[in-house]
Amino acid sequence: MDAKLRVLVAEDEPDVAFLVASLLDQDGRFDVVGEAGDGVETVRMAETLHPDAIVLDLFMPKMDGMCALREIRDAPRPCVVVVLTAIPMSHVESNTWLSADACLRKTELQSLPTVVASLCRETSGGPPS
């Protein structure tokens, strides 16, 4: 049996975090290794948990997702980052597009497992989907 992809969910809305974690858990290819409710916690957990992927909300307390994304990208251990947002993509800063591996609207949540698995496979040779 292939190893599961380790995913950190960074979302400050508990209902959305639960939905994301449940969707990934039910898929079978993922192990949700942590849930962060703010940007500072996200960066700290990324450093200690070494996830294969992070699902990152843009608007969180203490440190927004953009600042967290910059710190995650500066870390020595790379991981896939999928930004998940409720705002229209036309309002997402262009540097988010350049820094994240993918950006999805929360209305596209059903495609999240496929996107994360595909990106992990492309960037790190992770387990097949």
Image (cartoon, rainbow, N blue to C red):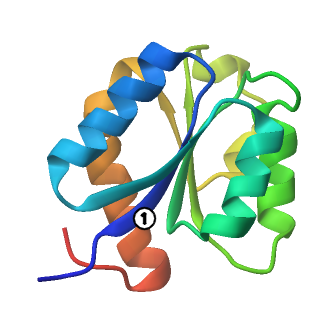
Q: Is residue 66 above or below residue 33?
A: above
Question: Image point 35% across, 51% down: which residue?
Answer: 115
Q: Is residue 58 left or right of residue 111?
A: right
Q: Is residue 99 left or right of residue 122?
A: right
The residue beneath circle 1 is 6
Q: Is residue 8 above or below residue 105?
A: below
Q: Quadrant of the C terminus?
A: bottom left
Question: Image point 41% across, 76% down: which residue?
Answer: 122
Of residues 67 and 104, the one drawn nearer to the viewer in this rendering? 67
Q: How many marks?
A: 1
Q: Is residue 85 left or right of residue 61?
A: left
Question: Image point 37% across, 17% down: which residue?
Answer: 107
Of residues 89 and 85, the one drawn nearer to the viewer in this rendering? 85
Q: Residue 20: which quarter of the image?
A: top left
Residue 54 screen position, x and y as percent: 56, 52
Residue 52 screen position, x and y as percent: 50, 68
Residue 58 screen position, x and y as percent: 70, 28
Of residues 83 and 10, the one drawn nearer to the viewer in this rendering? 10
Residue 28 seen anywhere in this rendered image of the structure: yes
Q: Is residue 64 left or right of residue 98?
A: right
For this orientation, the residue located farthest to the left is: 1
Label 1: which secondary element: strand
Residue 95 seen anywhere in this rendered image of the structure: no
Residue 108 screen position, x and y as percent: 35, 26
- Amino acid type for the residue under numbered disc 1: Arg
Give neighbour class at mark 1: few <14, some 14-19, many 20+ (Cα, 10 Å).
Answer: some
Q: Quadrant of the N terminus?
A: bottom left
Question: Image point 71% across, 46% down: which residue?
Answer: 42
